[in-house]
Image (spheres, helix red, strand yellow):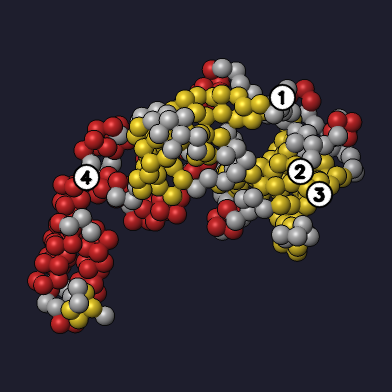
């Protein structure tokens, strides 16, 4: 293996430090970090040099960071350490988006968190064939937080209405950051929750995105995963029903492996329901997993959207808690 054309086995520790410094000064931090990893592998006892090269890289990152970006997002970075701030900033990807482009699509997955720096983005949802405007986002606003921090389909769409400059981070990149900097993802999530403009706008304007109300119901759901051809597979899970509407349901399931749960998003299901309360009736329907949220003790809440609404007469026969009101 070579480093800058020189066999790494022939490089002294001091020569490695020079290469790390040069790469950092040139803004090639990926290379600088790789060289530092090589130094740690080939001379693990050179602790002072290893520490000093880390300081060199962080110092150069701080020196070369975009000051205008830091000013715009000062409240975001306020609780971050210098290393956390640098890690997030250099993980962000810059993009320029033309007007009329969709950043989020209602009912589709989203794996990015957007930081809008200039331009305007309109957020809306479709209901009964029409677009219902929720809010307009501009410089200093975040987008995508409602799906980024949990496995979920988008509950609304977002489109650029002017040229937009933004930065974004992917969910996979965030997981890698969180492994290296524990707590960074929660700090980011807290900022996004505090500065979310879409949910407050929905509440303030009294907008209701659901076509049909949900009602509490008790019972058991058994969901078999369908393959790409729509055939039932042997893979399945069980869960306790929480609530149901004519267009979907939610239930609690237990699972020990988070990655298995997240893999259920967008999967099509063949679901059989059996209700508590003395009734022996059971019902079967097809649906798609549209959201997954973690609770405690390996409990997950699974949200399913039916492929077709349940017929009104059939739905009225479900043993729901009709007096608890629509939710």
Q: Is 21 rendered above or below residue 178?
A: below
Answer left or right for 187 relative to 4.
right
The residue at 53%/45% (across/down) is 110
Q: Position of residue 72 (x, y in %)?
A: 28, 32
The front one of 180 and 172 is: 172
Q: CA distance from mark 4 to mark 3?
A: 55 Å
Numbered label attached to residue 307: 2
Residue 195 visible in this rendered orientation of the protein: no
Which residue occupies 9% across, 71% down? Answer: 14
Q: Secondary structure at mark 2?
A: loop
Q: Earlier in the sequence, mark 1 or mark 4?
A: 4
Whichever of callouts 2 and 3 sits on the residue coming sooner in the sequence is 3
Say if mark 1 contacts mark 4, CB within 8 Å: no
**SS class of the residue under badge 4?**
loop
Asked if residue 157 is positioned above or below residue 25 in the image, the reply reads: above
Residue at mark 3? 272
Q: Which residue is mark 4?
A: 65
Residue 319, image x, y percentages: 84, 33
Where does label 1 land, which residue?
Answer: 326
The picture places residue 50, in percent across and down from the top left corner, at: 17, 65
Above or below residue 89? Residue 138 is: above
């Amino acid at each position: 293996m070579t480093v800058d054309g020189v066999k790494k086995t022939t490089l002294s520790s001091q020569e490695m430090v020079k290469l790390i410094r040069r790469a950092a000064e040139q803004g090639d931090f990926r290379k600088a970090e790789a060289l530092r990893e090589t130094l740690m592998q080939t001379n693990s006892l050179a602790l002072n040099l290893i520490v000093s090269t880390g300081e060199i890289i962080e110092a150069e990152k701080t020196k070369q960071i975009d000051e205008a970006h830091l000013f715009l997002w000062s409240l975001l970075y306020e609780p971050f350490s210098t290393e956390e701030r640098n890690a997030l900033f250099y993980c962000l990807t810059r993009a320029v988006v033309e007007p009329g482009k969709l950043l989020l699509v209602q009912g589709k997955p989203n794996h990015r968190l957007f930081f809008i720096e200039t331009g305007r983005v309109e957020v809306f949802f479709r209901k009964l064939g029409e677009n219902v405007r929720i809010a307009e986002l501009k410089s200093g606003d975040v987008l995508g937080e409602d799906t980024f921090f949990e496995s979920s389909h988008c509950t609304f769409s977002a489109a650029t209405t002017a040229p937009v400059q933004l930065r974004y981070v992917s969910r996979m990149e965030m997981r890698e950051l969180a492994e290296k900097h524990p707590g960074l993802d929660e700090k980011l999530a807290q900022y996004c929750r505090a500065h979310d403009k879409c949910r407050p706008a929905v509440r303030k304007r009294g907008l209701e995105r659901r076509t049909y109300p949900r009602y509490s119901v008790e019972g058991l759901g058994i969901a078999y995963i369908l393959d790409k051809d729509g055939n039932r597979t042997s893979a399945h899970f069980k869960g306790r029903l929480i609530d149901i509407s004519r267009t979907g349901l939610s239930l609690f399931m237990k699972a020990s492996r988070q990655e298995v749960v997240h893999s259920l998003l967008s999967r099509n299901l063949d679901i059989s329901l059996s209700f508590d309360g003395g009734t022996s009736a059971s019902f079967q329907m097809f649906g798609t997993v549209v959201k997954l949220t973690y609770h405690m003790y390996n409990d997950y809440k699974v949200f399913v959207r039916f492929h077709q609404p349940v017929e009104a007469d059939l739905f009225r026969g479900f043993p729901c808690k009709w007096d608890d009101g629509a939710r």
